[in-house]
């Protein structure tokens, strides 16, 4: 007996129902009491129940003529929960098995297929400059996605002017106070572009003084003075000045 598996996608989303098919064939001679089944486990080694549907011909079969086969639909539920939760396993391996009471070649009695799990995980961007426009945050850092996956803006964002680049860079306006959200989705590359997961970036405005980087061109003749708080949001007091000197004489131009 030999077995082949087909129809299983190479990428699945958390909690989705995954379907495929196994075909068990009598390769050489009549197979007596043939079997046709499948099992699965996740990347952490945990067993995943596999449902084997109604086979054609219906099992059990007393004898399967040489060259004939048994075809069975199979299905299982991928680990995890869609929608921003962190799924531990990174993939699923499915093993199809066959055999017969008179099988003298067990080397071809199994076939395996593997699928990775695409997983978008909720993000936070805290202490953002209150009222800032076109702020950015990369949401891809904690997501588990195949190479070539595409990010896009999802439905239900509450931040003003939300946008999302295809590689996961979110752009948004920070509220004057409190928080807002940017909803997004990520989908696997073709031919599995319909396999997606969704998550939410929560943006929180800072409640106190916030520092932004400063820069200044130094003068060759003496100290250069600049206000280091002038570009920092949330400053109620007068901005102090900082003075800088070149560490070595500047060459004349």
Image (cartoon, rainbow, N blue to C red):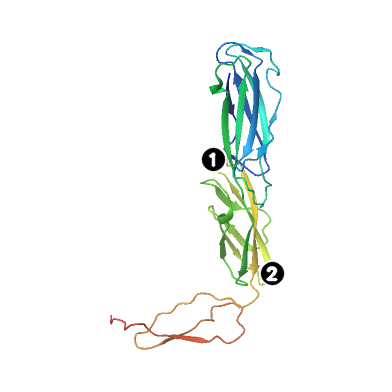
Q: Position of residue 123 (x, y in %)?
A: 62, 58
Question: Is 231 rendered above or below residue 203?
Answer: below
The residue that appears at 39% across and 82% down in the rendered structure is 218
In this image, 166 relative to 52: left or right?
A: left
Local secondary structure at mark 2: loop
Residue that mark 1 sits on: 190
The residue that appears at 61% across and 60% down in the rendered structure is 162
* Depth check, front residue: 221 or 33: 33
* Depth check, front residue: 106 or 128: 106
Residue that mark 2 sits on: 178
- The quadrant in which the N terminus is found is top right
Give the crowd class for mark 1: few <14, some 14-19, many >=20 residues within 10 Å: few
The disc, 2 or 1, on the residue closer to the chain's N-terminal end is 2
Question: Is 95 rendered above or below residue 169?
Answer: above
The residue that appears at 67% across and 53% down in the rendered structure is 155
Question: Is 156 rendered above or below residue 237?
Answer: above
Q: Position of residue 75 (x, y in %)?
A: 67, 32
* Depth check, front residue: 169 or 51: 51
Question: Is 198 rendered above or below residue 17?
Answer: below
- The quadrant in which the C terminus is found is bottom left
């Amino acid at each position: 007996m030999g077995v082949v598996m087909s129809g299983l996608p190479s990428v699945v989303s958390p909690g989705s129902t995954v379907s495929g098919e196994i075909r068990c064939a009598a390769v050489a001679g009549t197979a007596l009491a043939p079997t046709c089944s499948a099992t699965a486990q996740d990347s952490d080694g945990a067993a995943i129940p596999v449902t084997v549907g109604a086979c054609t011909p219906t099992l059990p079969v007393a004898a399967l003529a040489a060259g004939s086969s048994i075809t069975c639909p199979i299905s299982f539920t991928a680990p995890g929960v869609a929608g921003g939760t962190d799924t531990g396993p990174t993939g699923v391996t499915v093993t199809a098995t066959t055999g017969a009471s008179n099988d003298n070649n067990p080397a071809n009695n199994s076939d395996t297929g593997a699928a990775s799990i695409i997983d978008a995980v909720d993000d936070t961007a805290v202490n953002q400059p209150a009222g800032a426009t076109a702020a950015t945050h990369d949401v891809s850092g904690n997501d588990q996605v195949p190479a070539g996956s595409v990010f896009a803006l999802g439905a239900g964002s509450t931040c003003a002017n939300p946008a999302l680049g295809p590689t996961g860079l979110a752009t948004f306006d920070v509220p004057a106070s409190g928080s807002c959200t940017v909803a997004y989705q990520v989908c696997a590359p073709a031919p599995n572009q319909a396999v997606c997961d969704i998550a939410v970036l929560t943006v929180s405005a800072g409640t106190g003084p916030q520092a932004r980087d400063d820069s200044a061109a130094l003068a060759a003749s003496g100290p250069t003075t600049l206000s280091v708080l002038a570009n920092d949001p949330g400053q109620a007091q007068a901005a102090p000045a900082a003075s800088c000197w070149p560490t070595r004489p500047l060459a004349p131009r």
